[in-house]
Every structure is written in structure tokens, then in C-alpha cells.
Amino acid sequence: MSSVRLSTTSYVVLGMIALRGPSTPYDLKRAVGRSVGFFWSFPHAQLYSEPKRLEEAGLLDLHEEQHGRRRKLYTITEAGQTALRAWLKEPVNAHFELRDIAEIKLFFNELVEPADVAKLAVDQIHQHEQRIAVYEDMRRRYSDIDAVSNRMVTLELGLGMERAALDFWRGVAAQVERGEFPDSRARDHKRRKTSRRRST
Amino acid sequence: MSSVRLSTTSYVVLGMIALRGPSTPYDLKRAVGRSVGFFWSFPHAQLYSEPKRLEEAGLLDLHEEQHGRRRKLYTITEAGQTALRAWLKEPVNAHFELRDIAEIKLFFNELVEPADVAKLAVDQIHQHEQRIAVYEDMRRRYSDIDAVSNRMVTLELGLGMERAALDFWRGVAAQVERGEFPDSRARDHKRRKTSRRRST
DNA sequence: TCAATATCGTCTGTTTCAGACTATCCGGAA
DNA sequence: TTCCGGATAGTCTGAAACAGACGATATTGA
């Protein structure tokens, strides 16, 4: 029940148990693998150690099952629900929580000569397609449940967001294919000018 | 010169030095703080330890300056350039590199009742605006240099991507404001139905 | 029946995190 | 001239997380 520092991974665990109900670490491992793992991946060993921490903090309840293989079944507590919801409501804080590899690669892309926009676009398209598949899979699995509202709102938002990104990169890819992209044009008139800097 | 494991942070350091030229850790700290730090943040102490590792791996050169305060000036080596470019070219691998907090929060958003789409949108809008500002700042700082091609291609892509996302979320916010969003409509006819599960 | 495969869980050295802490420099007020 | 505050610059450390090797138990079907 002592105060622990909760990481994003902690909230992923909390969130998964809140969504799925009572779960063993292995349940979580499989569920994470085909859903939220596409947005936040981590070693599966964490799914054994993290719930233990959360249980010690009073955010999960533990029910040890003692027949056959010893396994641990975790349930979320009231305190856990509260902590999770509080986190979900607060904005992403700028404090060591921002990490976006795709954007980093884009940021530094000017360093690869000539800028390989085509490859970049393909990479992004692939990633967004994958994420869309994750959301669509969830939608498929839940469409038979009658509680349409909250879950469906979320799924549609996720899909919408991913589709917007996908469209953007598909557009880029198409432009590149039609030779409309600046990098090919710019290359020849660059040759003449060398590393002159800051004339004004 | 031994082989070390390079993390994303390593590549950020390499990338910053490649972009800016010779830099001290403190230079990096400031530069990161107002640019790439918005996509990938980490404790500044890393900017002292990481270059040392990279230097030992032969990816950076060290020039110790010994007048006044002792400071270390790092330059990227050929090997460093090569490693960086190789990383930039390879697609984001699915192996512990995917981490997107905003998407996580969206994923679990159905758990906050009623789904607070408005707040979510505001958060996203803020974040994308901030990132747009980063790209625009870069563009402002570099627009006077005549090497238009690579850097400008990258900046336009970054801006385009962020604007697409921003537009999407602005659209969502507008819908919410006009009351067109499903969550308000869905709430009443949900009350009646309780936790029945999976009828088929 | 036992071998292969799938399921489930633990362990461990290394790296990173997060921020407290130390130290230096510089300008202006007392 | 010293003293103070703030900006600049760098170090240190305990606690987590990482990454994956490893160990153990079930299940199956030959």
C-alpha cells in the first residue's frame, strides 16, 4: 500500500486488467501482444514483476491459484481504477513521456543524402496500416457486445486518427511516384552552390 | 572502438552532432531542449555519459578544451556518420521501439466514463501545435541558408504530417462542440443495459 | 511413452531514469 | 571589493527498466 512511482507500463497493466477483468500475467502477455503492444512494447517479464509492484501498492488484488501450475490472478481494486482514470484524464506531461521514434527519424532525415522520401513514406504507411488493423481487430471482437458507446467512440477516434496519418503518407508516396517531389528537382541546382553560410 | 549497443538516445546524440557540427554536452542540452526534445526526451545527464560511450565506440571524436572551465567538444567521425545513416534508413523495428503515450491513452479512453473526447482532443491539439512550432522554428532558422533541398524537404514533411494530425483533432473538437459526437447520444440508452456478456 | 511443441514463469547483468547535487562564471548592488 | 543571485556547466547515485536467456510444466500425437 506504500506509494510507488507508476510508469506508463504500470498504467498499461492496470488498463489491460480494467478492460479484460481478472487476468494472469500470461493472459496479459497474450492480450498485450495483439493489441496495445503495437503502441507500447516492453519485455514480457515486466508483466510478472509489474503486477506484483501494483499489488503491493494496493492497486491490484492477488488471488493465488494453487491447483496444477501455480499461477497468479490479478484483479483491479478501487484504488487502481481511481489511479488509472486520473492518469487517463491528465494531459500527456512533457516530462520524460514524449517519445516518438518515427518522428525522430523524420527529424534527422535531411542527413540521408538524397532525402529518401519514398522509403520514409513506405515505412510510415506500413506502421499506420498495422495500427489500423489493431483497431479494426478490436472493433470486430467487440461489435457483438451491446455496450456500444464508450468503446466504440474510442475505436472510431483511433481509426480516424490513423487513417488521417495514413492518407497523408499515401499522398506523399503518390507525389514521389509522379516525380512531383522537390528532392529530385532540387538536386541539380544544388550542385553549384557550396557551403556558403548565412549571407545576411 | 568496441561494439556497443546503440539506443535511440545514442542516435539522437549522433544526429544532433551531425546536424550542428562539433558540440559540447551543454550545447546539446540546449539544442535538444528546443527541438528534438519534443519528440524524444531524456534526462540531460545522458548528454554527458552518452557521448563518452560513443567516443569509446569510435563514433565520436573528443577534443578536450583546457582553458577556463574544462569542457569536452565532440565531433562525429566517419564511422558515426555511417552508423547514423544506416539507422535512419532502416524501418522502425517492432522490437521494443514502439512507444506512443498519446495512443495508449486513446486506447484506454473507453475506461473513462463518459468518454471525454473533448479533453482528449484538446490534449492532442496542444501537442501537435507544439510540434508544428518546433518545425516552424527550424524552418525560420534555416530559411536563409541556400541549401534548400534536403532540410526543407524534411521540414515540409514534418509540418505536413503534424498538420494532418492537427486537422483531424480540430475536426473532432468541432464535432464535439456542435454536439455531433456519439458519446452524448449514446449515454441514455446505455443505462438500461447492464453487464450482459457475449450473447452469441 | 516419450519427444516435440506450446505454454507459463523466473532470473540476471547491464543500461537508463530521474533528479538531487556540486561547481563555476558573471553582473550588479551594497 | 565583497557579496548575492542567477545563469551556466557538469557529476553522482539509488531505483527501475531493459533484453533476453533460461527453467519448468503441460499437451499432443507418433
Image: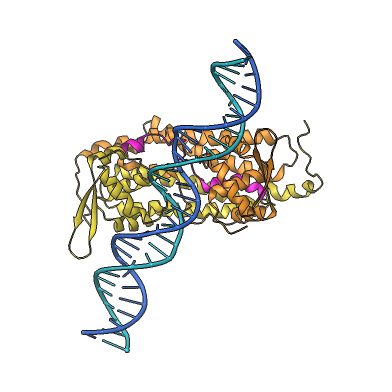
Chain colours: A orange, B yellow, C cyan, D blue
- Residue at 31% x, 46% y is B14
Q: Position of residue A12 (x, y in %)?
A: 58, 46
Specify whether residue B94 is painted magenta. Answer: yes
Q: Position of residue B179 (x, y in %)?
A: 68, 52
Q: How many marks?
A: 0
In the image, farthest residue toward the left: B67
Quadrant in the picture for residue A1: bottom right
Q: Quadrant of the C terminus of chain A?
A: bottom left
Specify whether residue A128 is painted magenta. Answer: no
- Residue at 25% x, 40% y is B1
Is residue A148 visible to the viewer in this orientation of the structure? Answer: yes
Using the image, determine if residue A190 lies above or below residue A10: above
Task: Give the camera-side residue of B66 and B186.
Answer: B66
Q: Position of residue C22 (x, y in %)?
A: 33, 68
In the image, farthest residue toward the right: B192
Q: Position of residue B123 (x, y in %)?
A: 55, 54
- Residue at 79% x, 44% y is B194
Range covered by the magenta-colored residues: B85-111
Quadrant in the picture for residue C26: bottom left
Q: Is residue B45 left or right of residue A10?
A: left
Is residue B140 visible to the viewer in this orientation of the structure? Answer: no
Q: Is residue A3 left or right of residue B84?
A: right
